[in-house]
Image (cartoon, rainbow, N blue to C red):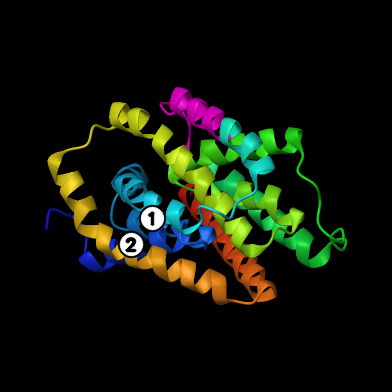
Amino acid sequence: MPLEIPTGFAVLAAVMVGLSKGGLPAIGMLAVPILAMQMSPIKAAALLLPIYLLTDPVAIWLYRRDFSKPNLQVLIPAGLLGVLFGWSTASFLSDRAIGFLVGAMGIGFCLNVWFGRKPVVGGRAPSKLKGLFWGSLSGFTSFVTHSGSPPFQIYVLPQQLPKVVFAGTSTLLFATINLAKIIPYQQLRPYSIADLQAAVWLVPFALFGTVAGAYLTKRIADVWFFRVVRMALFLVSCKLVWDALLRSH
């Protein structure tokens, strides 16, 4: 196998990518940090992109009828704008600063949910202005480290969408963003045959995770689903902040 990392790390990262595609988006954010323990974050992100692309069609099929059209009409163009910005600034952006910003926002959102004012009954309505901001940030952070989930959740969770619609909206948005990353990634770090072979080898594990994620999403009670999502968001955000602070010393 043409991977320069222990197989266990690669398989675990692939399964997490699949779980995120299946409806548990925050879990997928752990994939890059896991691989980054054995390789550079940039190389880890590049290795995972083909896996995302090859599992996206399965996830789209699973959620083809469950998504929020009003949200996607704003989030998809905004996400593509964020990818464009990430591409244009990739040469001088600090991974540490980006990770800290995303992590801090995720922590702040979770703390506000748990200790702030009670959410609006029935959820908030989609906002074009907020959707443009958070969607662009999702595209940007997804481009840099495949960590677009916290901005997406900060914007969408207060709407209190049904869990399947929440999962489907996330799936369609990030499938589109992943397609938009192909040319920029190839330009910034051209893929080798070994990279593509490694990705193909990991696809079955990612597909298993995708189906398992969809199964769990549809069977977990709504209240527990969103508790798990928020807790995962909080833990991943803490990890991003910790890594950023650790690299600064």
Magenta span of residues: 79-94
As measured in the structure, the alpha-carbon distance from the residue carrying label 2 to the one carrying label 1 is 8 Å
Which of 180 and 187 lies nearest the eye of the viewer?
180
Q: Residue at x 60, y 51 (%)?
A: 67
Q: Residues within 10 Å of mark 2 (few under 14, many from 20)?
A: many
Q: Amino acid at mark 2?
A: Leu
Which of 27 and 24 lies nearest the eye of the viewer?
24
Q: Is residue 95 visible?
A: no
Q: Which residue is mark 1?
A: 58
> Are circles 2 and 1 on residues that touch, CB within 8 Å?
yes
Comparing marks 2 and 1, which lies closer to the viewer? 1
Q: Is residue 62 above or below residue 95?
A: below
Q: Residue 231, image x and y in percent?
A: 62, 68
154 in magenta: no
Q: Is residue 232 above or below residue 240?
A: below
Please tell me whether mark 2 sits on a helix, a strand or a loop: helix
Q: In the displayed image of the protein, which residue is found farthest to the front? A: 65
Q: Main secondary structure of the magenta part?
A: helix
91 in magenta: yes
Q: Residue at x 69, y 51 (%)?
A: 156
Q: Is residue 43 above or below residue 226?
A: above
- Is 43 left or right of 247, judged from the image as shown? left
Q: Amino acid at mark 1?
A: Val
Q: Residue 73, image x and y in percent?
A: 63, 36
Q: Which mark is residue 207?
A: 2
Which of 54 and 241 lies nearest the eye of the viewer?
54
Q: Residues within 10 Å of mark 1 (few under 14, many from 20)?
A: some
